[in-house]
Image (spheres, rainbow, N blue to C red):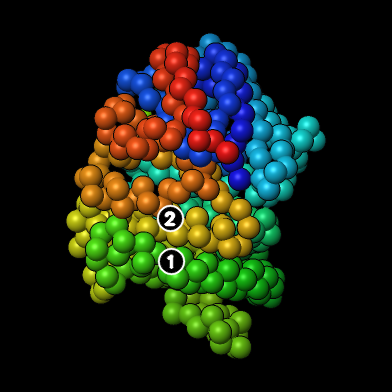
Amino acid sequence: MYIKKLKLHNFRNYKSLNITLTKGINIIYGENAQGKTNLLESIYVLGITKSHRNFIDNSLIKKNEDYLTIEGIISKNKIDDKLNIYLDNKTKILKYNNNTIKKISDYISNMNIIIFYPDDLELIKGSPQIRRKYINLQLSQLYSNYFILLNEYLKILKLRNEYLKKINKKISKDLNYLDILTGYLIDKAILIYKMRDKYIKKVNEHCSNIYINIMNLDGFNIKYKPSIELDIKDPNIKEKLKKEYDKRLDYDLKLLSTSIGPHKDDIEFYLNDKNLKYYGSQGQQRIAVLALKLSEIEIFKKYKETTPILLLDDIFSELDDNKKNNLLKYISKDIQTIITTTELNNLDSKLIKKSKLFNIKEGNIIKIKEVKLDE
Ligand SMILES: Nc1ncnc2c1ncn2[C@@H]1O[C@H](COP(=O)(O)OP(=O)(O)O)[C@@H](O)[C@H]1O
Ligand SMILES: [Mg+2]
């Protein structure tokens, strides 16, 4: 799939913008603080409904304005669809082909995005929460029922935690009710465990080869780390999990929350038996994130029968030429790619030749170079 047209109104430093993108490679260039990242961010928000940066929604609205709109035409298998987002201080309205969409799960699987940006290293170095958020997002883009399942799980989790508090404060003492909640929670947890496990296996089918191709290093893999020992294929998994929850009941009552479950999951990145979080060089970590995300492209191709839109925010300045070229091999003509850079010199001249170029200054496009090799 690719984004054909993008229209912005009051998005960060853009008063209004109306551009046509090529389905191949698009390069957004300009000096610092001109709006390159903002432009990528608007495309991300259009697809995912939230920013990839940790900002509250309101900061997306242009200063001194009270609403923003983003509109995009997404082309998939020769069919065009229109996505719209309207945001003000109180509401966010999502539209798909002019129909208002109430459920985010119905919206976010329409436009698939993979983004690379300098803070990506947090995916390895940061807290488990960042990795869970990432996996949840990827699975939600792949399967809209995952998003629904996850929200059901979180709802029951909240009920269980509230009930633990009530028992602790002796407002309630009905342990049967707690058992019922725990049972529901485990049912949902097992489904999430299975989907995450399958997903990590899919990623592993691709990422180690990608890592070899870019880094020339063998043995890269990703491990799924649920908060407890778990045999996903065990037919008695439900009973075993129930025992674990029972065993931890006193602890959970003290903690006033549920100490195990998918909300405590993590993933780890390994080069052979070396955990890259602790023992990887910055370069190894960076390529690990690239390999993970490039694997997503293969997964999308296979399971959604389309390619996602690739957003590359200022990542070329940090890679040496060799790795840059290895990476560019993955960015073939059939994946729409939108690259930002301050220096066109950071990019290969052959790449520039086949790209559509947008020069940005203070939230305006001041120059466009079309591509001839488009179709
Ligand atoms: N809500 C907003 N309203 C107006 N300007 C904004 C808003 N948020 C960020 N900006 C401006 O956007 C610019 C940064 O844009 P950005 O896309 O991050 O730059 P870069 O081109 O370096 O990637 C800054 O000048 C900043 O003041
Ligand atoms: Mg930037």
Quadrant where the image shows the N terminus: top right
Element carrying mark 2: helix
Q: Image check: 46 left or right of 24?
A: right
Residue at position x 47%, y 40% in the image: 337
Give the residue displayed 29% in from the left and 27% down from the top.
343
Dot 2 alpha-carbon crowd within 10 angstroms: few under 14, some 14 to 19, many 20 or more: many
Residue tagged 2: 294
Q: Which quadrant is the C terminus positioned in?
A: top right
Q: Position of residue 196 (x, y in %)?
A: 53, 67
Residue 73 visible from this viewpoint? yes
Q: Position of residue 342 (x, y in %)?
A: 31, 26
| Viewer-side residue, 244 vs 292 | 292
Tag 1: residue type?
A: His
Q: Are marks 2 and 1 in contact (CB under 8 Å)?
A: yes
Q: How many marks?
A: 2
312, 50: nearer the viewer: 312
Farthest front residue in view = 372
What residue is drawn where x is 36% and y is 67%? Answer: 209
- Residue 292, given in percent of the width and then of the height, sits at 40, 58
Residue at the top extreme of this rendering: 64
Give the secondary structure at mark 1: helix
For marks 2 and 1, the one nearer the N-term is 1
Q: Which mark is residue 183?
A: none
Q: Cβ(mark 1) to ligand 2 < 8 Å?
A: no
Quadrant observed for ligand 2 in the rendered image? top left
Q: Is residue 59 visible?
A: no
